[in-house]
Each structure stands twice: as C-alpha cells, then as structure tokens.
Image: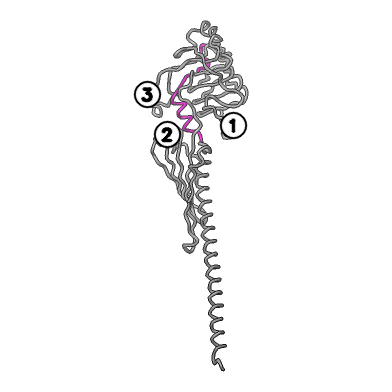
Amino acid sequence: MTRRGFALAAVLFALVVIGALVGGMFFASLEGIRASRGVAAGERALAAAERGADSVMSVWDRSRTARLAAGDVDSVTLRLDDGGATVWVTRLDDATFWIVSAGWSGGATAADAATRRINLLARLTTIDPRPPAALVTAFGATVEGTARVSGIDGAPDGWGARCGDTLTEPVGGIASPDPSAMVSAVIANPGALEGAPAVRAALAAADSGVSPAMGGAAWRALALDADTVPAAGAGVLLVDGDLDLVGPYRFDGLIVVRGTLRTVGNGVRVHGAVFAQRAVLGVGSSEAWGGAQIQYSRCALEQARNAMRPHREWRRGWVELGY
C-alpha cells in the first residue's frame, strides 16, 4: 500500500507549527519590550512628579503662599528635559497645605509617554499668635533702666497696610513659672510692665529638646531648616545659647533663646514675642534715648509663621497616592 503526498503534508504541518511558535515568540518579545518601555516611561513620570513636589517644598515661595486664604489654589509648572510637572498647592487652614504634583514624560510614541500624580500634606511649624505673654522666661527676668515690656497688641512700625487696623486682646507682659521673681522689677519701675496681667504664671520657655513657642517642635529639626539671620529683620530667630542685643536693633517676629537674653544700650525694639530661659533687659539704657522695648504683636507672629517653609507630614503617609 502506498501513501502518496504524506511526507509533504507532514512537512507543511511542521512548518506551520514552527512558524506559529516563532510568531508567538516574536509577539511575546514585542509585548515585553512595549511593557518595559511603558514601565520606564511611568518611572520617569513619577520621578518628574516627585521632583515637582520636592522643588515646591525646597524653594517655598513665601510671598505667594502667604496670600492664599483657606481653599485657595496656586500652581506652578516645572519643565524638564524629557517631560515636566505641574504642581497645585491648596491651603487647607492656617498651617496645612495639600500639594498635588502631576508629572509627565514625553516620547516619540505613545508607548514612551506617561503621566503620574502624587499627593502629600505639608504643614508649617506652628507658632501660636497668642503666647502667654510678650516675654516668657523659665527662670525670671530683670528689667532695668528704661526697658519696657508690653503685652498690648501693636503692629510694627511701618506695617500698617500689612496688618490692618484690627488689634486683639492683650496678653501678659512677662510670664514665668514663678511670677514672684518679677515683683521687684514692677516696684522699681511701675511703668516697665503692662499686659493682662502684667506678670503671670506660665510653663518654661525653652527646654533642651523642644520649643514650646513653636508647638513643641524638635529643636534640632528647626535648626536644620533655619536660614542665616541678618543683623536685623523679621521672622523667627533661634539661638542655641545666650543672646546679646546691642542697640540700635530691631526684630519683628518670634525670638527663641535657649540661654539668657540681654539687651544692652538704647534702641532695641522687638515686636512679636520672646521666649528665653532668662532675660536681663535695659543694661546701660538711658531715659534720653529709650531702653529696650519688647511689645506683643499678633500680626508680626502671624507673618513669621507664614514666612516659614513647611514640612512634609510623614504621619499621614496614606495621603501619598500614585497612579
């Protein structure tokens, strides 16, 4: 018995099967390449989104964010070599911001393009605009000469347009765990202290690890984020040790001293609040020129808070989303 054409049919069938296998391998390889390109594009887009968020956090535009009211949104676009990112900053309350960064990566084809978005919460270091007093000390204060401490709210000189006409209720003049330490100062110069009350009890000013003036923030974290302090200015002044202010000198905002604060000579002016372990005010001052003056200013403290860079709220890690 003969089987004409059987070998030819078997060869053709084998060629079809082999061709299908080879085609399947090429198809799988092509899909793998496309998937790899898509993953790479997604990683570049995610890196762009993270760079956009980090750029906004590291170069915080204080003048723009200070003008944002709760619910207001500001945006900025960052251009990169192969893509970019658009970042939206939404102010949620006085100290909290919601930052959304949408990054994208470009390419010649759709497979090389992708978008990713991340979200995070950022929080400004808390500064209480109503401290216990204009001057808060842990171990008392000495008020000499013509020095003056006032808990009556007042705007810094020249800040009328920035602060408006609204003044708040007064705070204490000097606060300390032992108010009796300031009785002699009040008797020596009855007009040196004013507030509601002029002298009151309060907790310590600044211990070795944290700053009560700034919501219990860790001192080390505050110091690492601090800028160089000019001879005079506004904002938050952190001093790890003693501080001597020699007049004329003006500072508007919050001063936190982990040692002793001394004011020497005439013309020292501080609007805002001062927290120190100990304070000696008015050394060498004269009636003709006027000694040191520390005056509570809610406006100066609020401006100092708005001028600070925010910190990522790590405790809310679930807010960081990516897709």
Residue 149 drawn at (x, y percent): 49, 15
SS assignment at label 1: helix
Residue 254 drawn at (x, y percent): 51, 25
SS assignment at label 3: loop
Q: Nearer the viewer, residue 119 or 193?
A: 119
Residue at mark 3: 166
Magenta stretch, residue numbers: 287-309
Residue 295 lies in the magenta-colored region:
yes
For marks 2 and 1, give the one nearer the viewer. Answer: 2
For marks 1 and 3, give the one nearer the viewer. Answer: 1
Q: Residue at x 51, y 51 (%)?
A: 48
Q: Earlier in the sequence, mark 2 or mark 3?
A: 2
Disc number for residue 223: 1
Q: On screen, 228 above or below 3?
A: above
Q: Amino acid at mark 2?
A: Asp
For marks 2 and 3, give the one nearer the viewer. Answer: 2
Res. 73 in view? yes
Residue at mark 2: 93
Q: Quadrant of residue 71?
A: top left
Q: Earlier in the sequence, mark 1 or mark 3?
A: 3
Residue 158 drawn at (x, y percent): 43, 26
Label 2–label 3 contact, CB within 8 A = no
Crowd band around label 3 with a 10 angstrom C-alpha radius: few (<14), some (14–19), many (20+): few
Q: Amino acid at mark 1?
A: Ala
Label 1–label 3 contact, CB within 8 A = no
Work out how far the residue at label 2 is from the one at label 3, CA to CA, in angstroms.
20 Å
Q: Amino acid at mark 3?
A: Thr
* Residue farthest toward the bottom in the current orientation of the protein: 1
Crowd band around label 1 with a 10 angstrom C-alpha radius: few (<14), some (14–19), many (20+): few
Work out how far the residue at label 2 is from the one at label 1, CA to CA, in angstroms.
25 Å
Res. 289 in view? no
Residue 306 lies in the magenta-colored region:
yes
